[in-house]
Amino acid sequence: MKGRADGEREKTMRQLVLCDEDVAGAGVLPHHEEAAEPRPARGMRRAGWLLVACGLALLPWLYVLATGLPATATAAHWPVAWVGLDALEALGLIATGLLAARGDRRHALTAAASATLLVVDAWFDTTTAAPGGDFATAIAMALGAELPLAALCGRLALRAFPLSAG
């Protein structure tokens, strides 16, 4: 009796090992093993630290801007700035839509860029609008179009690369 139980136990263990090998071969690790993140290449690490340093260097600059900029300013190419921003948004939305409709995962890149542009547009529309009707229109555009589209694009970008369940 004991020999038969040992044989079945050994058979079950072989099946588990084979199952683990199949799962590992498919790129999925068993739940009991932790996947080690690969160390980024040296150039990538340097680029990362350079970006962190640049971001930190901008922090004092924010104070300079906040205390030194005039309350009002005239821009010589105001229409070109807004048309350019909206043109980039249109291109981003079209590219994202076409890539997503084709099932191309690169839509995540254009979706992320489009979401960013839409949030920037909503921010500048509302912060540069004159009081009254212009401000109400800016708020309506931000809440009714720009921010919902940004949320959709953000969701598309994040869903293209699902996080591992672990």
Image (cartoon, helix red, strand yellow):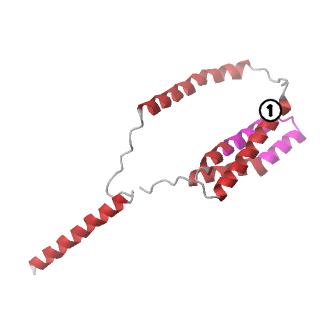
- Which residue lies at the image location 78% right of the left edge and 41% below the top edge? 87
Q: Please tell me whether residue 64 belongs to the stretch shown in magenta.
A: no
User: Quick check: 68 above or below 118?
Assistant: above
Q: x and y percent of residue 92 in the render? A: 70, 45
Looking at the rendered image, the quarter that the C terminus falls into is bottom left
Q: Nearer the viewer, residue 10 or 25?
A: 25
User: Quick check: 17 above or below 163?
Assistant: below
Q: Is residue 30 visible?
A: no
Q: Please tell me whether residue 123 belongs to the stretch shown in magenta.
A: yes
Q: Is residue 57 visible?
A: yes
User: Quick check: 106 above or below 64?
Assistant: below
- Which residue lies at the image location 17% right of the left edge and 70% below the top edge? 10
Q: x and y percent of residue 128 in the render? A: 81, 33
Most frequent secondary structure within the magenta stretch: helix
Q: Tell whether 11 sits left or right of 119.
A: left
Looking at the rendered image, the quarter that the N terminus falls into is bottom left
User: Quick check: 48 above or below 137?
Assistant: above
The amino acid type of the residue labelled 1 equals Ala
Query: How many dots with numbers?
Result: 1
Determine whether the residue tagged by mark 1 lies in a helix, strand or loop.
helix
Outermost right residue? 133
- Which residue lies at the image location 20% right of the left edge and 72% below the top edge? 11
Q: Which residue lies under the disc numbered 1?
A: 81
Q: Nearer the viewer, residue 161 or 73?
A: 161
Q: x and y percent of residue 151 in the render? A: 67, 50
Give, as a single range, the part of the protein colored magenta.
114-143
Q: x and y percent of residue 124 in the render? A: 76, 36
Instruction: Write down the quadrant of residue 64 in the picture.
Output: top right
- Which residue lies at the image location 72% right of the left edge and 51% below the top edge? 148
